[in-house]
Image (cartoon, rainbow, N blue to C red):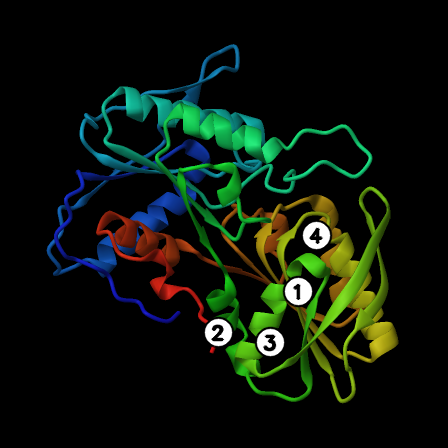
Amino acid sequence: MSNKTYYSGHSDRGRLIVASCLSADYLAKKVVAEYNRQMQGKPSRGLTHLNSIDFAFTDGERNVRLKDNVRGADVYLMQAVSEDFASGLSINDNYMSFLIAARAFREQGARLVTGILYYLAYGRQDKPTRYMREPVTVRLMADLAIEAGITQLVTWEPHRNPQGFYGKTKVDTLDSLNLFIDEFASFRGREDVIAVAPDEGASKFVTDFADAMGFTYALAAKTRPEPGRAKINQIIGDFRGKEVAIILDDMISSAGSMRALTEKLVQEYGIKKVFIGASHNLCLPVACENFKILHEKFNLEQVVVTDSILQTEDFTGLSFFKVSSISEILARTINCIHFDESVSAFSYTPS
């Protein structure tokens, strides 16, 4: 990634604490290790890691206990608000732990609490389904987080930019463009490669990726005839001379869209190799089966995701499956915020 400078100037902020709930421990440990590695030999007040701060009572209620004094500290509270298949904790268990933890830090005197929700659950519920009486649930979750006590939010590649739902609370959204530019760097400038957006929502991201890589790009027109099933009606783009397709999206749930799109690219557009990249993989068993079918029958060469969600062995055991860590970018983000530097300094900037 570009611009790996760590800032080590003086800060008027408090003692630096990275805290993690149980489901976030796996990534928080890597973030802390990366932060300490990059700060070696540079003046710093040091970093304290408070891990596994949440637990359950026998009736299932979540709670948080802090073993250290946090008065006056600047806390970076990490939580994976996704289903934790290893521990059996649900999305809602983890969201409750996050809210309770934020309140615990504020009540115990923390100066600032920056929530780091690298996968923003409920992010897709940013507007009611047409003709349905549904709430804007992402706004509810924002209200709860603010009321719980967060003073800032950091999130990784959300489905929609959530800033509008958090009012005056600052939101930093980290994008994955540089990560995928690095992952697919070997394809840069090749005329036989095309980048493909699986739907309109991914079109801007894929366009920026294609421009940075020197590719052409295409857009799939998708409909959902029924819940959980995607239909690709057509793909708009010039496929003359194209043999390799790179499909990028923010999230993989069932991989139904990826399967429908990949099959169409291979069967109707003559694509010989397909690569898939996504910022979040929800680890649903049906997605694993879809990937196996695409690899065996429809020229799927590789799937690249991040560790924004702890990947299960069903996925990591696939020979064509790669997990890229976001620990470095989270460590740099914490450093930038703590020393009052711009988080956008290491984001991709179109030329």
Q: Secondary structure at mark 4?
A: helix
The mark closer to the camera, 4 or 2, is: 2
N-terminal label among 4 and 3: 3
Residue 89 visible, this angle: no
N-terminal label among 4 and 1: 1
- Name the residue at the top extreme: 59
Residue identifier under label 1:
203
Residue identifier under label 4:
288
Residue 161 visible, this angle: yes
Q: Secondary structure at mark 3?
A: helix
Q: Quadrant of the N terminus?
A: bottom left
Camera-side residue of 213 and 27: 213
Q: Which mark is residue 350?
A: 2
Residue identifier under label 3:
210
How far across and how far down the image is residue 292, in percent?
Answer: 74, 59
The mark closer to the camera, 4 or 1, is: 1
Q: Is residue 293 left or right of residue 85?
A: right
